[in-house]
């Protein structure tokens, strides 16, 4: 993963530990209305992919155990991981693109509700993503993947050369020479693996995305409602399809790109289709980028425009993130796929304790505050969720007091200690297992391994009943907290 060149080391701090009575009187532990739901407190576990689904996208026992453990910490809300809306293979990622996934998803909602004693609301994040291939071996790229054209022959000065001879000749050239022959996209496919973009409108399935996606999202959201989820979060962030439509890099000329209005058109059409399908009394929101953090990417001014447009369209909450793009991702190894959290924009999404002068905690605060202010100035009271390095009571309470957001999300701190807000609420904050922000978990995610935390995955691994990873070296679920 990319790190800032300053390499300044930061240390998370527990901050002030509130008493139980102070916590009860705080903003953080006050209720908040989110559409049809009322959260008991303003604590939020955002979507994280733990890689515990089956290879066919079904809910497994490990998925149920994972989310039940978070639910025992009784946060205001948990958002289930990015869940695919298409009925296509996508590896060990949850899917919701067909009715056959409903029994498992219903089992999950029931388990979480029981584990939290009904205190935690459960939402699901639904996502669409385009195709990305692994970085190919050099010879394999030229023999199988490169589509030979007359432009290649002309660059070689041999208009009558056979396709086989073109492939063989190109494979012998250095990258420096290839850059004068291959297109930028072809060089990218060689160096990083081929990646589809929403601007590839020469292909019918990309050109038709605006016709396909509203119904796909709407059908998935209806399944979520049937399965018992309390609400749906549309995934409009990071490197995926909907974020790509919102991006300044979206230069489509068919009315679904270019201007702010054109880039927001499909996301708004998806919102309209989903709302019509699930009804006005079902909680619906989205997660989108406060800033893309790439050269030529969308800015906080763009995000303010989108936030107001989404609030006007009737979303019940707005959740912000930042960065996490393919555009500046590190070159993957041969046989591996590019990972959108390895470059500077990826760092903005998941900063670690080695940072720049700004530090890793609260990098999304300023931009989120601007979005919330724009939404309020437009006359909307839509709740805003802000995440990013939140790990203690003072930070969370301060964000609420300063008007940054209405709900505070915490991913890595919740992973380190699923009971951290429960402990704070009971005056036991001194026992919180504090995230060290080493991004050990992110390294596992990058390899599509079961995500765990180094602070707990080696604890009591030989105790009876502790479920372990396939290699038998790490526990799959954090230890339970027993109040003193």
Image (cartoon, helix red, strand yellow):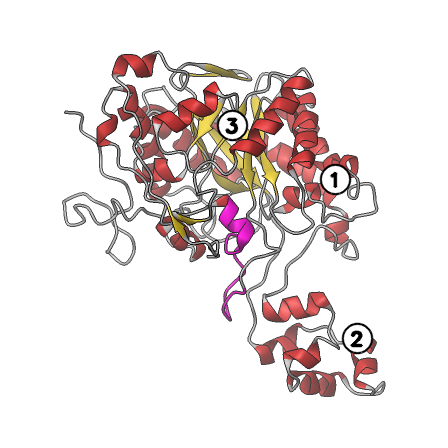
Residue 140 in sight: yes
Check if residue 337 falls in the magenta segment. Answer: yes
Label 2 with label 1: CB-CB less than 8 Å: no
- Say which element carries label 3: strand
Front-most of 359 and 273? 359
Tag 2 residue: 149
Q: Is residue 236 left or right of residue 19?
A: right
Q: Residue 148 location, x and y as percent?
A: 75, 76
Q: Residue 417 location, x and y as percent?
A: 30, 36
Up/down of 84 relative to 103, above or below: below
Front-most of 52 and 305? 305
Q: Which residues are magenta?
A: 331-348
- Say which element carries label 2: loop
Distance, label 1 to label 3, CA atoms, is: 23 Å
**Which corner quadrant of the image does residue 377 belong to?**
top right
Up/down of 12 relative to 200, above or below: above
Tag 1 residue: 263
Tag 3 residue: 385
Q: Give the class, few, some or many, for how many residues have Cα within 10 Å of label 2's Cα (few <14, many ≥20).
A: few
Front-most of 430 and 207? 430
Q: Residue 176 location, x and y as percent?
A: 67, 79
Which badge, 2 or 1, comes first in the chain's sequence? 2
Q: Nearer the viewer, mark 2 or mark 3?
A: 3
Up/down of 145 relative to 378, above or below: below
């Amino acid at each position: 993963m990319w790190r800032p060149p300053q390499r300044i080391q930061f240390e998370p701090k527990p901050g002030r530990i509130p008493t139980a009575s102070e916590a009860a009187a705080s903003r953080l532990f006050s209720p908040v209305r989110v559409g049809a739901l009322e959260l008991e407190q303003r604590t939020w576990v955002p979507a994280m992919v733990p890689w515990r689904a089956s290879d066919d996208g079904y809910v497994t026992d490990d998925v149920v155990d994972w989310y039940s453990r978070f639910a025992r910490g009784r946060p205001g809300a948990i958002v289930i991981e990015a869940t695919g809306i298409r009925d296509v293979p996508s590896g060990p990622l949850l899917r919701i693109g067909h009715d056959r996934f409903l029994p498992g998803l219903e089992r999950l909602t029931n388990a979480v509700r029981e584990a939290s004693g009904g205190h935690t609301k459960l939402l699901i994040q639904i996502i669409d993503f385009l195709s990305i291939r692994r970085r190919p071996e050099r010879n394999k790229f030229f023999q199988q993947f490169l589509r030979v054209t007359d432009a290649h022959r002309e660059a070689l000065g041999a208009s009558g050369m056979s396709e086989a001879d073109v492939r063989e000749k190109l494979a012998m050239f250095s990258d420096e020479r290839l850059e004068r022959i291959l297109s930028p996209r072809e060089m990218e496919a060689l160096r990083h693996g081929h990646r589809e973009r929403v601007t590839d409108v020469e292909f019918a399935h990309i050109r038709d995305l605006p016709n396909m996606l509203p119904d796909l999202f709407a059908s998935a959201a209806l399944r979520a409602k049937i399965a018992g989820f309390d609400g749906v979060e549309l995934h409009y962030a990071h490197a995926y399809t909907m974020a790509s439509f919102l991006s300044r890099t979206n230069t489509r000329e068919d009315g679904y790109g270019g201007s702010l209005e054109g880039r927001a058109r499909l996301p708004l059409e998806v919102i309209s289709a989903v709302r019509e399908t699930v009804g006005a009394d079902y909680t619906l929101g989205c997660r989108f980028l406060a800033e893309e953090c790439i050269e030529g990417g969308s800015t906080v001014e763009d995000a303010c425009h989108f936030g107001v447009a989404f609030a006007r369209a009737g979303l019940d909450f707005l959740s912000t993130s930042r960065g996490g793009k393919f555009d500046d991702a590190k070159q993957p190894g041969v046989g591996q796929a590019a990972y959108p959290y390895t470059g500077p924009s990826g760092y903005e999404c998941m900063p670690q304790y080695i940072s720049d002068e700004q530090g890793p905690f609260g990098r999304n605060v300023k931009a989120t505050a601007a979005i919330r202010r724009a939404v309020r100035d437009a006359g909307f009271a839509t709740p805003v969720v802000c995440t990013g390095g939140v790990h203690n009571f003072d930070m969370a309470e301060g964000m609420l007091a300063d008007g940054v957001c209405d709900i505070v999300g915490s991913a890595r701190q919740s992973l380190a200690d699923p009971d951290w807000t429960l402990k704070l609420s009971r005056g036991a904050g001194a026992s919180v297992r504090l995230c060290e922000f080493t991004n050990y978990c992110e390294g596992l995610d990058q390899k599509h391994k079961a995500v765990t935390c180094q602070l707990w995955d080696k604890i009591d691994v030989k105790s009876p009943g502790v479920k372990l990873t396939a290699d038998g070296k790490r526990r799959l679920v954090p230890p339970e907290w027993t109040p003193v």
